[in-house]
Amino acid sequence: MSSPTISMNGTIPILRIFDEQKAREFYQEFLEFAVDWEHRFEEDLPLYMQISYDQCVIHLSEHHGDSSPGSGIRISVKNIEELHTRLLSKKYKYARPGLEDTPWNTKEITIGDPFGNRIIFYEDK
């Protein structure tokens, strides 16, 4: 149901992480997301951060109640074959994702992060 006075402008998924170093290695170094900001209530408390790549924004959280490990998100991309080539060239030792042609007319790269979350990059054919 839509209303002329209400507008919704997208979503920002929150993915659970357990290890800051592994999260940075995966999201920053491997997937090339930028860190927009980070927050901790105190120095030794859990990390909450926002990362982005172009228009794609994701929140990563070490906080217990923010999300469950094992979540899945789909990210629409342009030039998925170039993304695939770039990811394989990095020789990341924990993932060598394939490129799949699906029956629902997309090309997809599925990658699991170090915390059990599934990220599916896709491009419509």
Image (cartoon, helix red, strand yellow):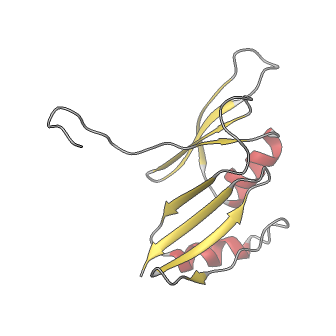
Would you identify the image quadrant in which residue 68 lies?
A: top right
- Tell me where residue 92 appears, x and y as whole percent: 80, 67
Residue 67 place in picture, x, y as percent? 66, 37
Q: Is residue 120 above or below residue 100?
A: above
| In-front residue for pair 3/52 | 3
The extreme left residue here reads 4
Residue 26 rendering spot, x and y as whole percentages = 74, 54
Q: Quadrant of the N terminus?
A: top left
Relative vertical location of residue 12 with respect to residue 63 in this rendering, above or below: below
Q: Residue at x 69, y 65 (%)?
A: 111
Left or right for 105, reference 39: left
Q: Nearer the viewer, residue 12 or 6?
A: 6
Q: Is residue 106 left or right of residue 31?
A: left
42 versus 32 height, above or below: above
Which quarter of the image is occupied by the C terminus? Answer: bottom left
Question: Which quadrant of the structure image shows residue 11?
Answer: top left
